[in-house]
Structures are given as C-alpha cells and as structure tokens.
C-alpha cells in the first residue's frame, strides 16, 4: 500500500536565506527538540544546507517509493527518509543521488545507511545518514508513505518543515518558527564572535567572561 500526499508548500526563500547563516550548535544552546540523533552524520564535510522537508517512509529492503519520490522533488527540497527502524539496507546510492540532484534537491537525509560514497562525492551532493552499507535495497513494491509525518533520528518531521543541516547535525524547525529561531541564533552568534575576540586579544579570560570562574572560586572558598 502506498500513501501519497501532495507536495508541501515550500518554506519562504527569505526565511531560508536567514536560516542559512545559522549553526545548528547555536540553536542547541537553548532549543532541546527538533534535533536528529547524532548518529546521523554528514557524508561530505563542511557543508551547511537549508531547505523544505519532503518526507518519505520506506521499510527494509524496498526502495520503490524512493525512486518515484525523486521525480517529485523541486529546487530547494530536502528529502528526509524514515527507514522505519531498518539499519541494514542502504536505500540511497549513486543513482538516487543523481536523480535527486537533477530535480534540484539540495540534500538528502536518511535514518539508515547509504552506499556509493564515491558517487555521492562526485555528484557533490550533501548527504546525512547513519554511515555506509554495501547491502542495498531492491524494487520489491512493498509500499510506503510520501509526504506524511515521519520520525527521522528520533525527531518528528512534518512535510514542509524547514531543515538546517551542517557538520554538527540536523535540525528540524516548523515553518512558522523559522524566522524567530534564525534571528535569535544570529544574535547569539554575533555576541559569541565579540566574546571570542576579547579572549583572543587577551582582554578577558573565558572563565571571567562566562562567570564560570566566579562560581568555582565561590565554592572553593577563595
């Protein structure tokens, strides 16, 4: 059985442009939900992408719906694949990478392994996954869901959510919260840069600036 829902409305480009300057680790200073499990890591280093989540749920050894879904992708989309607990079969390889990139997708995220790392590198296509596997899926026509709520790396992903992925991990943000999250994070990053400059220039020590030294000395009786 296949559940096929309409393609989601894309996140406004202005919101994504703002989000593209944010580091996931900055948001991690205050936000505790929306982050995928840290086992989902980038296959290509030093990449940061933002886009609209197109969600997919496929099980085990079958990737029939994944092949179909690549033809539905639009420029700016990120395909988020819930493998429904499977960690053996690599559903995403070189062929899927070429198809997703040709459609204009900016990245893929798989809660499971990928394969064909060299082909992914050659395509220069950012991917996040739970590592690699040589055991691949087939077109067994077992069913699945497209643009339904999914769980990827323990995070709930709704079709149309914003995705921010970088070398530290993957963050899912509801579309109506993107601007507020981005603006708060950018403010924190600007403050952080000023503090780092003070430490680098030996104007202040880190412990003094953060208040950590005062806490330590108070309890040490100094």
Image (spheres, rainbow, N blue to C red):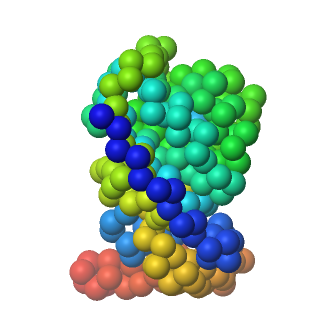
Q: Does 175 appear above or below 120? A: below
Q: Does 107 appear above or below 89? A: below
Residue 32 visible to the viewer = yes
Examine the image and state in which quarter residue 187 appears.
bottom right
> Foreground residue, 80 or 185?
80
For the image, the number of numbered tags is 0
Examine the image and state in which quarter residue 140 appears.
top left
> Foreground residue, 214 or 42?
42
Residue occupying the far top of the picture = 135
**Residue at the (53%, 35%) spot, across then down:** 68
**Residue at the (33%, 55%) spot, across then down:** 149
Q: Position of residue 73 (x, y in %)?
A: 60, 47
**Residue at the (33%, 66%) spot, across then down:** 33
Q: Position of residue 216 (x, y in %)?
A: 32, 77
**Residue at the (57%, 25%) spot, across then down:** 93
Q: Is residue 173 left or right of residue 144?
A: right
Quadrant (top left/top right/bottom left/bottom right) for the N terminus = top left
> Foreground residue, 143 or 184?
143
Quadrant (top left/top right/bottom left/bottom right) for the C terminus = bottom left
Q: Is residue 181 left or right of residue 121?
A: left
Q: Does 209 appear above or below 178? A: below
């Amino acid at each position: 059985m296949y559940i096929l829902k309409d393609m989601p409305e894309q996140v406004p480009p202005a919101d994504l442009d703002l989000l593209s300057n944010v580091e996931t680790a900055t948001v991690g200073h205050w936000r505790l939900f929306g982050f995928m499990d840290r086992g989902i890591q980038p296959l290509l280093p030093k990449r940061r992408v933002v886009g609209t989540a197109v969600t997919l749920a496929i099980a085990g050894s079958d990737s029939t719906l994944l092949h179909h879904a690549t033809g539905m992708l639009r420029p700016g989309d990120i395909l988020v694949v819930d493998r429904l607990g499977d960690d053996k079969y690599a559903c995403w390889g070189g062929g899927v990478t070429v198809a997703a990139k040709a459609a204009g997708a900016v990245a893929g995220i798989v809660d499971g392994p990928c394969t064909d790392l060299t082909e992914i590198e050659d395509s220069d296509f950012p991917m996040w996954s739970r590592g690699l596997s040589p055991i691949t899926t087939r077109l067994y026509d077992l069913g699945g869901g497209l643009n339904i709520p999914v769980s990827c790396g323990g995070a709930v992903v709704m079709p149309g959510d914003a995705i921010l992925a970088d070398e530290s991990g993957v963050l899912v943000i509801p579309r109506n919260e993107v601007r507020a999250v981005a603006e708060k994070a950018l403010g924190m990053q600007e403050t952080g840069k000023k503090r780092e400059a003070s430490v680098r220039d030996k104007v202040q020590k880190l412990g003094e600036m953060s208040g950590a030294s005062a806490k330590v000395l108070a309890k040490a009786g100094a």
